[in-house]
């Protein structure tokens, strides 16, 4: 049985071929929601594996089996498990699963209802399909990195969040769940080709609408989300940072009022782009006069659209985050609790992080009977 057993995905069986990045994150998301996720680990860590032990949060709630996929016995073990599961997740380079003897054709022949979820950076086809890469490369090519950062500075997005998680794991999860719904309705499984370049480009559609309307041009620093003084982060007197995002006029007026600038004619026209650089300099000088905590005391909880920039430990301790129980420490490891929240099938606390291969016997007894689904 799964480690969780609660949640909307209880009863879903997911077989995950161990890897790095977005595919394991997707598996964690499924485990958080109650799916029985079995992780197919190597018998020993390879040279490129990140063997994080109890810190491998992406493996929480999963069961681990240790299999040597370079042997026919190991491949047959996995295929026997395929017969009993709903989903297979893999994040190998294109062609690797086929060379192992575990490609979609072989697996779907064993289980026609299987949803075979494939996670790559560049996709299964295309000129770059077989090239190495990481989050920053994929979102650079897709256009998703373009508006990140301040004008005149090198673009920089939060590490691994825009590509690996947003454009990768989340799109893989949505695609796989859609495939499961289809398989249950038709009896036929399929392959889900989730590529980070595809997902992160799709995430751009909201911004592309603004671009098309002229509100977010290709020239960085001239659009409503990357140029204005009222949509920025600012350094405070203590070296910490705060954010303001007063996009709507009524929120902008509240911000000006709180800052004592309601009657300052220099700020009378919110969307006068030529004035933004000067207004930004004035805002920067103003926010540098007080500490982050002082600005929080003045602005937090108002409709000025304000928040401090917190490190993960500070975020976990913030009263709002604590009240919602967003973070927890399990075995000394800080981690975010499962999300989103469900009224009818509430999620359990995060499951344990398994040791490599600790569940091999139990999983083979539980799943390995080849009875199908």
Image (cartoon, grey):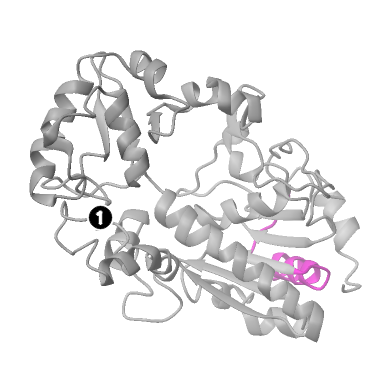
Q: Position of residue 334 (x, y in %)?
A: 57, 27
Label 1 Cα crowd, 10 Å radius (few <14 / some 14-19 / many 20+): many
In x, y percent, where is residue 119? 52, 66
- Compared with residue 248, is residue 350 higher up or lower down, i.e. above or below? above
The residue range painted magenta reads: 64-86
- Residue at 32% of width from left, 31% of height from top? 255
Residue nearest the viewer, comparing 241 with 39:
241
Q: Is residue 249 above or below residue 67?
A: above
Q: Is residue 154 left or right of residue 205?
A: left
Which x, y percent locates residue 167?
A: 45, 61
Secondary element under disc 1, as helix, strand or loop, is loop
- One can see residue 66 in this view: no
Residue 182 falls in image quadrant: bottom right
> Which residue is nearer to you in this view: 252 or 234?
252
Quarter where residue 68 is shown: bottom right
Queried whether the magenta region covers residue 70, the answer comes back as yes
**Residue under circle 1?**
147
* Residue in the picture at 32% in, 54% down: 136
């Amino acid at each position: 049985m799964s480690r969780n057993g609660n949640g909307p995905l209880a009863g879903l069986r997911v077989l995950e071929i161990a890897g790095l990045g977005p595919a394991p994150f997707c598996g964690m998301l499924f485990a958080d929601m109650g799916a029985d996720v079995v992780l197919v680990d190597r018998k020993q860590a390879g040279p490129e594996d990140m063997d994080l032990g109890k810190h491998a949060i992406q493996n929480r709630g999963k069961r681990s089996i240790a299999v040597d996929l370079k042997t026919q016995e190991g491949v047959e073990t996995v295929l026997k498990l395929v017969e009993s599961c709903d989903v297979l997740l893999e994040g190998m380079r294109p062609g690797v699963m086929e060379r192992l003897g575990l490609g979609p054709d072989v697996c779907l022949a064993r289980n026609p209802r299987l949803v075979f979820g494939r996670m790559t950076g560049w996709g299964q086809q295309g000129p770059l399909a077989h090239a190495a890469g990481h989050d920053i490369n994929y979102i650079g090519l897709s256009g998703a990195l373009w508006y990140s950062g301040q004008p005149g500075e090198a673009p920089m997005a939060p590490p691994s969040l825009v590509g690996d998680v947003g454009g990768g794991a989340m799109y893989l999860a949505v695609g796989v769940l859609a495939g499961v719904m289809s398989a249950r309705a038709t009896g036929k499984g399929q392959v889900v080709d989730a590529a980070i370049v595809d997902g992160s480009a799709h995430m751009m559609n909201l911004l592309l609408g603004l671009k098309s309307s002229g509100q977010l041009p290709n020239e960085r620093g001239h659009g409503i989300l990357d140029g204005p003084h009222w949509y920025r982060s600012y350094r405070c007197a203590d070296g910490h940072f705060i954010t303001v995002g007063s996009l709507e006029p009524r929120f902008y007026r509240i911000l000006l009022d709180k800052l004592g600038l309601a009657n300052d004619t220099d700020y009378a026209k919110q969307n006068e782009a030529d004035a933004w650089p000067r207004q930004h300099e004035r805002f920067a000088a103003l926010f540098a006069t007080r500490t982050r905590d002082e600005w929080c005391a003045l602005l937090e909880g108002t409709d000025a659209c304000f928040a401090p920039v917190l490190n993960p430990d500070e975020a976990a301790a913030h009263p709002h985050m604590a009240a919602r129980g967003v973070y927890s420490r399990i075995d000394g490891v800080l981690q975010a609790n499962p999300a989103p929240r469900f009224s009818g099938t509430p999620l359990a606390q995060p499951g344990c992080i398994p040791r490599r291969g600790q569940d091999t016997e139990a999983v083979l007894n539980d799943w390995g009977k080849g009875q199908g689904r």
